Image: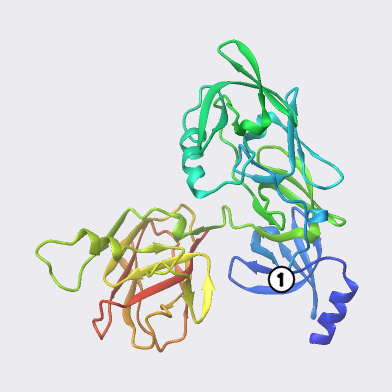
Amino acid sequence: MLALFLVAAALAVGPTVEVTTVDGVKTAGVLSELSAEQVVLETGDGPRTFAQTEILLLASIAEPSDAQPGGAKAKVWVELTDGSKLTGVSYTAAKGKARLGTGQEDAIDLPLSAVRWVRFSQPDDQADAAWSAHADGGLTADLIAVRKKTNVDFLEGVIGDVTDDSVTFELDGDKIPVKRAKIDGLVYFHQAGGELPESASVLEDAAGWRLSLKSVKQNGDKLSVETVSGVKLDRPLAGLVRLDYSSGKVVYLSQLDPESTQWSPFFDFSKESPSMAAFFQPRRDRGLDQGSLTLGSKVFTRGLAVASRTRLSYKVPPKSKKLKALVGIADSVGDEGSISLEIIGDGKKLFQRKITGKDEPLELDVDLKGVRRLAIVVDYGEDLDVGDYLNLCEARIVR
């Protein structure tokens, strides 16, 4: 079987990938077709065809090659109006169009109507707070971010042509050429309009791009894509890291805000300690100890860490079918951990089980058809240990 797979891989020209379906089944093979309708893999058992509607994730298994020949280092960071993020080595704009140099032969043309902001210094946590405060606010004009020693000042006006050397900026009716070396970035104002449609998939590649897509298809050694904001471009197939098709099919609990979160201490304090309550609050996409979300020595990127005794209540999205997760006592707690897990739908008990640290991780699969309110209750187990907590890895509602 392995020999057949290796032969298929040697004969094929596509990357080796793994497809995960909505039901959680994983299949590895060589990508031979990717279209709007289906994905075809060459496997040791022959070709496998997956309808696009049943795919949750398509991820590269092998280390992707450098998507920017020559190892060009990013000097420009761009975000589109649909949330797509691009990087490049140069940025110019004129007559309603922007041109993003990527270090490859051909630059990419972008309509300015799709460009939200451009930054000329690498985003970092300290600068991001200031950027978010301005770029995410209710804009009434374009913004230009000017470096002032250790700070960045945001000025309102109208952004004109952008060259490698300067930016034309209209301020109070005067057009002022500003040297590019002084500019940290640009924020474009867009008139409020209709909401963009939901993305069909999200592409991540080796160059650090993250594109919110309306459509994607394989075209030789490239992926031809159209973003939700209407930008059409090609990306190297060899640089594919992952294609996330979960939008509209799956909602991760870590993405949802619970309607209520109730943690009850083991001891009945006359006055609850705010610091203790904060410590025992559920964690999203990380462990309760602020470390990685791990179960069975495997690290997960999505999920919840929930301490005893906690009750989480959620409004279930329409047309939901199942609640699925891999659940178990956190690795950091060890074999002595013990909790009781209950899943309640509209006041009716749908699932109940005691889980210990000696148990193998459990595949949770609960029917949610017709359920409007969901409650997850993690209670103390037989040992009544306040240090016990449960990891619900890849906890998701399947629609």
To which quarter of the image does residue 160 belong? top right
Residue at 38% x, 74% y is 390
Where's the N terminus, which quadrant? bottom right
* Residue 176, above or below 354: above
The disc labelled 1 sits on which kind of residue? Answer: Ile
Residue 216 left/right relative to 256: right
Give 91 or 220, whichever is nearer the viewer: 91
Residue at 39% x, 59% y is 371
- Per the image, label 1 sits on a secondary structure element best described as loop
Give 323 or 10, whichever is nearer the viewer: 10
- The percent position of residue 170, horizontal first and vertical second, equals 62, 16
* Residue 35, above or below 80: below
Give 128 or 379, whichever is nearer the viewer: 128
To which quarter of the image does residue 61 belong? bottom right
Residue 314 left/right relative to 52: left
- The percent position of residue 42, horizontal first and vertical second, equals 81, 72
- The percent position of residue 295, horizontal first and vertical second, equals 48, 78
Residue at 75% x, 24% y is 94
